[in-house]
């Protein structure tokens, strides 16, 4: 694991206790899809807000009053940490409670937690990002970083798959990326609508449409478990080295600090050893069931 | 669900002893706070006045044991947005479900002077066997704080925190000495759902499974251990067929121990 | 004086308890309750289980009278110091809405100031367990309560000269002798205690108990007793290559056989002095204006433990037993640089159906080792 993956900005919490959330105000709310919205937050305590930093791929524990907490990746630009954003799909009771909030309302935040995408490890290399559904969210801060220092990297590619065209997140932004000459962006959907003219099928099918130079490509994968597996195995089959395939895992993080034990994945704590792992570091458990 | 404002609550009784309804009235310290958030619209055990439905939340006590009840539960389901069954009778059929293994006609003839006045079904079954139930709260009787938690969670819009793990979790957290390991007392705690606060083991008795099987209950292994420690098969059948005997996997294991064909591996 | 062996009279034990209490400590020591020797607050040596012992086997614990009147003639009870440092249920904070709903909230983390505890009669396995829990709760993100209790705790340890039926600390290299972390370590001899101070605090305590330097005979006797204890463990576990074997064999058929017996009741994890998993629960009052967060002992044996939005990561009991054993004996090494098992035997004794961690791990490890040998043999022959 690179030093960069293990570097951690300080964890911000309430009362300097890691399990106590700090108050954050919703500044802005953007509806992304029928069940997903992006919330821009700002820590209410200016002292904490000034200290808050995060690395691409890290997550916060977001608290809805009385309902509970959910681990949610930070999806905004790490270049500006005074405000930060979370794209939240309203599927559980915590995220459903958040869906009822409006700008001006408050949530609790602890974080950032976990490892980050190792940007320095892919300097001078081609970078291939594979995102499925809401898996684009934790990759977005990395895309901002890559584009900000575009000349440091070789070819830059994003393969992004969603269920249907309506489920595409950050649509205008993705379209903006597509127009760039230095960023190859391919999207696919499982269920096309009448207006969709792009590829149809799972995101791994898109791999046939890009040229992957296995020796000089770093791969970053984030999506549903089944997609992570298919993508990782397919890159391994293309001889991309294990150390250059990185996957962000979703698990039931509860404390964020490796104390509650819930998110254990083999010998790893996903909350503090992950969520970003190199394939090499989790190869023993990656394809096993019920780990 | 009503995040602000009052929810209309209905409490229904089917075949039961009323003990679970009483646990609502037992909420002495919390009743005022409850009344602020909830309008008790239908609760014959507590008041004769009835506000007409539909209701936001319906609490159902008792099993479905008569033809009339089997019809009435369908109306109850229709008039409640969120239906919660409370107690062993409503969630498992209760102690009266023991008749599911017996001849009800014979019982009637034995007990009643005029058995032809009695109209009952051959079985006593849980409410969920008849209509869709939104939440099942176990216990004989229910734990009043768990009941409050279900209502509070509904009003806040979160998942109720009603653990489905074993009684041992509560027993060990309370610091009890295990009655089975240290005293040799047969105890159903390891396969019974928590909720009572390990009441019986706290008083040096084995657990009677008032809260029914835990989510991962393995009665076969426990009963094999009981047999090794000298319990007879009829004793094991009786232990499993208590207040929740008609719930799986208690039912199947008790059937196996009753039948002559069981092989003990 | 630190590190040297002294003799103190048995009657000084009561003075020790009194001194600790005078120093403002709650003295937590062994005492008989409900048919077991448990840790509880004690006020005098009278409350110690003098003349009693415990008979422990898989799924079996009984108290018996000893033929002598030893104070510490038993091994370990159902609970360790864990419940005092990492309480079974603890409120982490309460939180109140202020102003209009959801416009903000105030957090209150104040809780009673952590007690100063003197643990009396702590065994080597439990000291090792403390060291392990330190790495969980007192590391990068310290748990404030654990940190405070741990910092002020006085540890009066006792060396084990008579291991119990489910003990295997010598296999785990954690006992029977206390080698670190203690303030004072006692070895019970027929007519006195041999005492060794491990810290300045322990030395100061020992000085107040009229110690006499132990002669070479006493030193030799203590050595002999502890050597003999190490050779008479009720259980044993061969830990050679065990982490690798377990991590590489998640599909071994023996996991299924254990799962047929395992009740997933979680007793093993709750008795274990090192298991640290917890549930974090948020709740509100009925009015919805006040919320609390509680932390309580959790267990990887519960179904809910692996709950996430998409379902359960470990829905089978097989997966849960495998997770526990593999984590304890293998994964722990990667996470904390040591085994998670201290060989105290509690999980064996307090399993309601007597599942034996040493047997289950040995069955798998022996099978894999045999297969490896057979495979090597086959390779040699084919050459």
Image (cartoon, coloured by chain):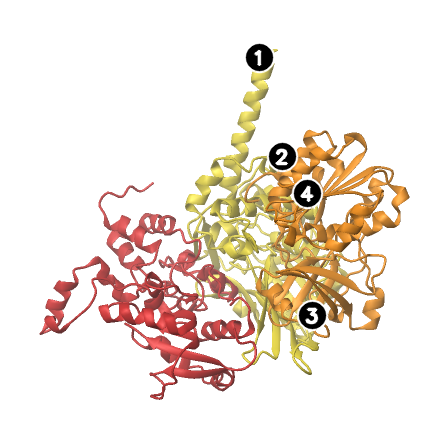
Are discs 1 and 4 located on one and the same chain? no
Disc 2 secondary structure class: loop
Q: Which mark is residue A198?
A: 4
Q: Chain of mark 1?
A: C
Chain with yellow colouring: C
Are discs 2 and 3 located on one and the same chain? no
Residue linked to disc 1: C381
User: Which mark lies nearer to you, 2 or 1?
Assistant: 1
Residue C73 in view here: no
Are discs 2 and 1 located on one and the same chain? yes
Q: Chain of mark 4?
A: A
Q: Position of residue A73 (x, y in %)?
A: 71, 56
Residue linked to disc 2: C241
Q: Earlier in the sequence, mark 2 or mark 1?
A: 2
Taking the image as shown, residue B68 lies to the left or right of residue C72, namely left
Chain with orange colouring: A
Disc 4 secondary structure class: loop
Report the quarter where the C terminus of chain C lies.
Answer: top right
Q: Quadrant of residue B142?
A: bottom left
Q: Position of residue C157 (x, y in %)?
A: 64, 58
Give me the C-alpha separation between circle 3 and circle 4.
39 Å
Give me the C-alpha separation between circle 3 and circle 1.
68 Å
What colour denotes chain B? red
User: Which mark lies nearer to you, 3 or 4?
Assistant: 4
Q: Position of residue C209 (x, y in %)?
A: 68, 66
Are discs 3 and 1 located on one and the same chain? no
- The answer to the question of whether label 4 and label 2 lie on touching residues, with beta carbons closer than 8 A, is no
Q: Residues within 10 Å of mark 3 (few under 14, many from 20)?
A: many
Residue at 51 percent across and 46 percent down: it is: C321
């Amino acid at each position: 694991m690179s030093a960069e993956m293990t570097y951690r900005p300080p964890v911000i919490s309430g009362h300097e206790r890691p399990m106590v959330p700090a108050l954050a105000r919703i500044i802005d709310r953007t509806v992304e899809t029928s069940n997903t919205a992006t919330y821009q937050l700002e820590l209410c305590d200016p002292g904490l807000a000034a200290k808050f930093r995060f690395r691409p791929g890290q997550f916060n524990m977001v608290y809805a009053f009385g309902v509970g907490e959910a681990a949610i990746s930070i999806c905004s630009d790490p270049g500006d940490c005074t405000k930060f954003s979370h794209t939240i799909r309203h599927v559980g009771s915590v995220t459903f409670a958040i869906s009822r909030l409006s700008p001006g309302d408050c949530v609790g935040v602890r974080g950032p937690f976990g490892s980050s995408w190792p940007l320095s490890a892919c300097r001078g290399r081609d970078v291939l990002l594979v995102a499925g559904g809401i898996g684009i969210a934790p990759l977005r801060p990395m895309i901002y970083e890559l584009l900000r220092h575009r000349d440091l990297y070789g070819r830059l590619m994003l393969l992004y798959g969603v269920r249907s065209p309506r489920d595409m997140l950050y649509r205008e932004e993705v379209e903006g990326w597509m127009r760039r000459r230095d960023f190859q962006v391919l999207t696919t959907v499982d269920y096309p609508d009448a207006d969709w003219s792009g590829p149809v099928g799972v995101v791994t099918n898109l791999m046939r449409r890009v040229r992957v130079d296995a020796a000089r490509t770093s791969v970053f994968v984030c999506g549903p478990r089944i997609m992570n597996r298919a993508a990782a195995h397919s890159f391994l089959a293309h001889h991309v080295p294990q150390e250059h395939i990185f996957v962000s895992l979703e698990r039931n993080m509860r404390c964020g600090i490796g104390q509650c034990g819930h998110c254990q994945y083999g010998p790893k704590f996903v909350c503090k050893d992950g969520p970003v792992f190199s394939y090499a570091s989790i190869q023993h458990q990656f394809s096993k069931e019920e780990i | 669900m009503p995040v602000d404002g009052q929810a209309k609550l209905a409490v229904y009784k089917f075949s039961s002893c009323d003990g679970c309804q009483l646990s609502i009235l037992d909420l002495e310290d919390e009743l005022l706070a409850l009344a602020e958030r909830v309008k008790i619209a239908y609760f014959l055990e507590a008041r004769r006045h009835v506000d007409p439905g539909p209701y936001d939340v319906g609490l159902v006590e008792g099993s479905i044991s008569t033809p009339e009840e089997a019809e009435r539960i369908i109306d109850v389901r229709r008039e409640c947005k969120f239906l919660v069954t409370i107690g062993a009778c409503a969630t498992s059929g209760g102690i009266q479900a023991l008749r599911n293994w017996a001849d009800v006609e014979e019982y009637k003839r034995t007990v009643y002077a005029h058995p032809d006045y009695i109209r009952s079904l051959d079985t006593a079954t849980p409410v969920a066997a008849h209509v869709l139930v939104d939440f099942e709260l176990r216990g004989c009787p229910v734990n009043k704080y768990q009941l409050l938690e279900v209502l509070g969670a509904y009003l806040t819009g979160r998942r109720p925190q009603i653990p489905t793990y074993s009684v041992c979790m509560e027993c060990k957290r309370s610091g009890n000495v295990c009655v089975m390991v240290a005293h040799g007392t047969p105890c159903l705690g390891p396969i019974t759902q928590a909720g009572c606060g390990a009441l019986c083991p706290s008083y040096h008795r084995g657990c009677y499974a008032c809260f029914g099987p835990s989510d991962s209950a393995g009665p076969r292994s426990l009963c094999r251990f009981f047999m090794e420690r000298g319990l007879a098969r009829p004793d094991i059948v009786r232990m499993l067929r208590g207040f929740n005997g008609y719930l799986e996997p208690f039912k199947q294991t008790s059937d196996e121990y009753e039948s002559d064909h069981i092989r003990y591996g | 004086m630190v590190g040297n062996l002294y003799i103190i009279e048995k009657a000084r034990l009561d003075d020790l308890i009194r001194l600790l209490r005078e120093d403002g400590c709650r003295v937590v020591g062994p005492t008989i309750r409900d048919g077991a020797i448990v840790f509880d607050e004690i006020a005098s040596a009278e409350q110690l289980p003098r003349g009693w012992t415990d008979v422990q086997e898989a799924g079996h614990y009984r108290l018996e009278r000893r033929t002598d009147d030893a104070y510490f003639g038993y091994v370990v009870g159902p609970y360790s110091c864990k419940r005092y440092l990492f309480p079974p249920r603890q409120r982490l904070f309460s939180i109140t809405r202020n102003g209009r709903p959801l416009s903000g909230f105030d957090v209150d983390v104040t809780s009673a100031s952590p007690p100063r505890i003197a643990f009396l009669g702590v065994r080597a396995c439990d000291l090792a367990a403390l060291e392990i829990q330190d790495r969980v709760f007192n590391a990068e993100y310290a748990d404030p309560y654990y940190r405070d209790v741990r910092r002020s705790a006085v540890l009066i340890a006792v060396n084990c000269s008579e291991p119990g039926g489910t003990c295997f600390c010598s296999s785990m290299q954690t006992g029977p002798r206390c080698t670190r972390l203690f303030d004072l370590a006692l070895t019970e001899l027929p007519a006195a205690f041999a005492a060794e101070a491990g810290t300045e605090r322990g030395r100061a305590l020992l000085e107040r108990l009229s110690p006499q330097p132990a002669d070479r005979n006493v030193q030799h006797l203590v050595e002999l007793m502890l050597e003999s204890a190490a050779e008479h463990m009720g259980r044993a576990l061969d830990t050679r290559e065990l982490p690798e074997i377990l991590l590489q064999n998640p599909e071994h058929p023996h996991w299924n056989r254990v799962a047929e017996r395992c009740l997933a009741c979680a007793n093993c994890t709750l008795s274990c002095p090192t298991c640290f998993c917890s549930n974090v629960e948020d709740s509100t009052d009925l009015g919805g204006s006040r919320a609390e967060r509680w932390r309580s002992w959790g267990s990887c044996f519960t179904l809910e433990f692996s709950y996430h939005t998409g379902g359960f990561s470990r829905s089978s009991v097989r997966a849960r037993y495998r997770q526990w054993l593999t984590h304890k004996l293998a994964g722990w090494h990667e996470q904390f640089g040591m085994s998670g098992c201290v060989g105290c035997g509690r999980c064996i004794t307090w399993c309601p159906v007597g599942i034996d961690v040493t047997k289950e791990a040995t069955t798998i490890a022996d099978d894999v080792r045999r297969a490896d040998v057979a495979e090597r043999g086959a390779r040699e022959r084919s050459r």
